[in-house]
Amino acid sequence: MSLSGVIQQQALDLQSHLLCLGNQINNKSLSIEEIGDVIPGSVMVQDLNSMTNLYMNRFGCDILHHSSEELTSFGPEYFLRFFPAEELIVQKHALFQFIAQQDYTKLHSFLQRVRPDVNSDYDWYFTTSRLVPSKFDPQATNLVHISVPVNTLNLTGFRISSMIENDEYIKRNFQRFNLLSAREKEVI
């Protein structure tokens, strides 16, 4: 298998693990705060109304050299501070299309570059996002992102898989499951 094939398979494996994890969060059997610091990657929760961070786990705070509270205080400036502006335009468009679907069963994944400050080089991250209802306002929607360094995809998938109960059905059928409509997923 080629290198790109290996990376694609690792990304699919990670997405299936994150779907299982997202289901447990949506079913309220786990909270993001309970697992945020256990996941070997950055975990962020964003308020879509204010476009601000509500939560960032310790891993993400360490990468960005700021506390979760500081990152929240940046508001929408957060994005311009840590991500290349030219890439934000493309990612923002795709992310808004994903959000407009209002499908809580779908995942949106993308590659992005991140740096802690203007004097640092950018590093590549594989990010998977999922819509979740706000636990404070039933009318609001939040976006949960889990970002892992590209060079650790395989290790991250293994650690997340061992952290949660394996849902073998989702892992075996993830690609087919991802093609189903929202109603079909709801029935399943």
Image (cartoon, helix red, strand yellow):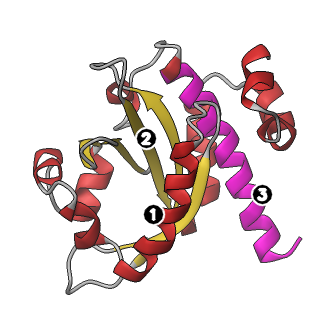
Q: Position of residue 136 (x, y in %)?
A: 27, 19
Q: Nearer the viewer, mark 3 or mark 1?
A: 1
Residue occupying image coordinates x 29% and y 43%: 57
Give the left or right position of residue 167, taking residue 145 as reference: right
Of labels 3 and 1, earlier in sequence is 3
Task: List the residue tagged with mark 3.
Answer: 9
Task: List the residue tagged with mark 2.
Answer: 144
* Rendered view: 85 above or below 146: below
Give the left or right position of residue 40, taking residue 63 as reference: right
Which image quarter is the C terminus in?
top right
The stretch in magenta equals 1-25
Of labels 2 and 3, earlier in sequence is 3
Which quarter of the picture shows residue 35? top left
Query: Can the viewer see residue 143?
Result: yes
Give the left or right position of residue 21, taking residue 178 as reference: left
Callouts 2 and 1 close, C-beta under 8 Å? no
Callout 3 crowding tier (Cα within 10 Å): few <14, some 14–19, many ≥20: some
Q: Main secondary structure of the magenta part?
A: helix
Residue occupying image coordinates x 24% and y 45%: 50
Callout 1 crowding tier (Cα within 10 Å): few <14, some 14–19, many ≥20: few
Which image quarter is the N terminus in?
bottom right
Callouts 2 and 3 close, C-beta under 8 Å? no
Residue 92, numbered label: 1
Q: Position of residue 184 (x, y in %)?
A: 81, 24
Is residue 62 part of the magenta span, yes or no? no
